[in-house]
């Protein structure tokens, strides 16, 4: 069957429609493929959404390649009508999601109608008459060429990957939070508390000695007062000053008048940055013979009263 120029021109919009659908779906993930087609593949063949979506994209690319290489009026009209019905099914299924969600399917439906009308118009009266001499390849060779092109295009499409979903800004900005409230651990060994997990070097340094562990924020006025009042002079116990780093993205108000924490007898350390530490500074933890005997924080308690 001779392939006429008008047949090739009529197949171009249909091939562009199918290739454009495949490109859009690869860019927007498996959920952008027609849900009714995925449901049919799942019902009849048991494919999950990912596999069904790949099959849909592969079929679109395969038919687009066939229309470019072996254009016929029947195949062109069949492809555009099938695309139109799939788009119409997507529009019907997405009525409850609003116009914005249905917009891609509506555009495909309109384009499919236009491509179908163009294929019918250009393909009219293009078939050779019965008495005309046949030139070019036979129908059998045309069918074989179409099968070969479809198989090759489908195999290539099966190796394509869907684009990863866009990252949720709220997820990206979220940081891990760790509760460092030590009041539930009064009477417990220091090594078995969260301090043992996040500050093992401090636990090893204290051993069985008596110590105070003070968690502070350098921008906290009450923290400065605590150190100035209770730790300016040497003490018999070990004193550890543990800085609480701000979480990522935190806005720190300027407190230049406070300056750094002053504690000549303290051993300074810091909690790991990059985490939201849930603690109410200043928090003081008293340790005796490796046991937590007192915990006080901004909300109450006093571990520093004179004996």
Image: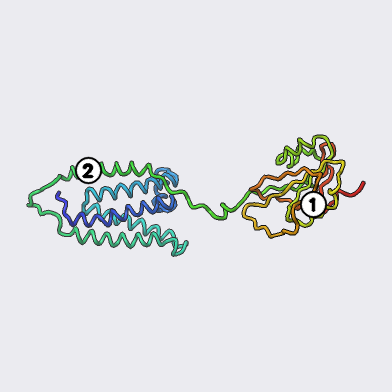
Question: Taking the image as drawn, is residue 102 in sight?
Answer: yes
Alpha carbon distance from label 2 to label 1: 80 Å
* Left or right, 211 with reference to 17: right
Most extreme residue toward the right, as rendered? 307
* Left or right, 263 with reference to 15: right
Label for residue 225? none
Q: Label 2's element? A: helix
Q: Label 1's element? A: loop
- Which quadrant of the structure image shows residue 122? bottom left
Numbered circles on residues, count: 2
Q: Position of residue 31 (x, y in %)?
A: 44, 52
Give the residue drawn at x 21%, y 54%: 8
Q: Is residue 111 above or below residue 231?
A: below
Question: Which residue does the numbered mark 1 point to in the structure image?
Answer: 297
Question: Taking the image as drawn, is residue 186 in sight?
Answer: no
Q: Is residue 190 above or below residue 244?
A: above
Q: Position of residue 97 (x, y in %)?
A: 47, 61
Q: Position of residue 237 (x, y in %)?
A: 85, 41
Give the residue drawn at x 23%, y 48%: 69
Question: Which residue does the numbered mark 2 point to in the structure image?
Answer: 145
């Amino acid at each position: 069957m001779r392939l006429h120029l008008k047949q090739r021109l009529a197949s171009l919009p249909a091939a562009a429609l199918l290739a454009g659908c495949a490109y859009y779906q690869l860019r927007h993930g498996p959920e952008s493929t027609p849900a009714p087609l995925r449901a049919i593949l799942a019902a009849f063949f048991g494919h999950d959404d990912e596999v069904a979506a790949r099959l849909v994209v592969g079929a679109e690319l395969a038919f687009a390649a066939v229309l470019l290489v072996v254009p016929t009026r029947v195949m062109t009209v069949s492809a555009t009508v099938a695309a139109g019905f799939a788009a119409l099914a997507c529009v019907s299924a997405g009525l409850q999601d609003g116009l914005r969600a249905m917009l891609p399917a509506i555009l495909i439906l309109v384009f499919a109608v236009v491509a179908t009308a163009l294929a019918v118009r250009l393909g009219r009266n293009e078939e050779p008459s019965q008495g005309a001499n046949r030139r070019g390849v036979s129908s059998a060779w045309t069918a074989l060429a179409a099968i070969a092109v479809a198989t090759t295009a489908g195999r290539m499409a099966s190796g394509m990957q869907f684009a990863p979903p866009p990252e949720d800004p709220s997820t990206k900005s979220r940081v891990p939070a760790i509760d460092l409230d030590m009041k539930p651990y009064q009477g417990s060994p220091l090594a078995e508390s969260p301090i043992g997990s996040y500050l093992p070097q401090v636990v090893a340094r204290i051993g069985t000695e008596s110590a105070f562990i003070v968690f502070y924020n350098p921008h906290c006025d009450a923290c400065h007062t605590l150190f100035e009042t209770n730790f300016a002079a040497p003490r018999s116990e070990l004193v550890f000053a543990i800085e609480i780093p701000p979480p990522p993205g935190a806005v720190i108000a300027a407190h230049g008048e406070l300056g750094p924490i002053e504690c000549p007898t303290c051993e300074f350390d810091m909690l790991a940055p990059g985490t939201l530490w849930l603690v109410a500074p200043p928090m003081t933890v008293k340790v005796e013979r490796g046991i937590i005997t007192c915990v006080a924080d901004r909300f109450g308690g006093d571990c520093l009263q004179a004996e």
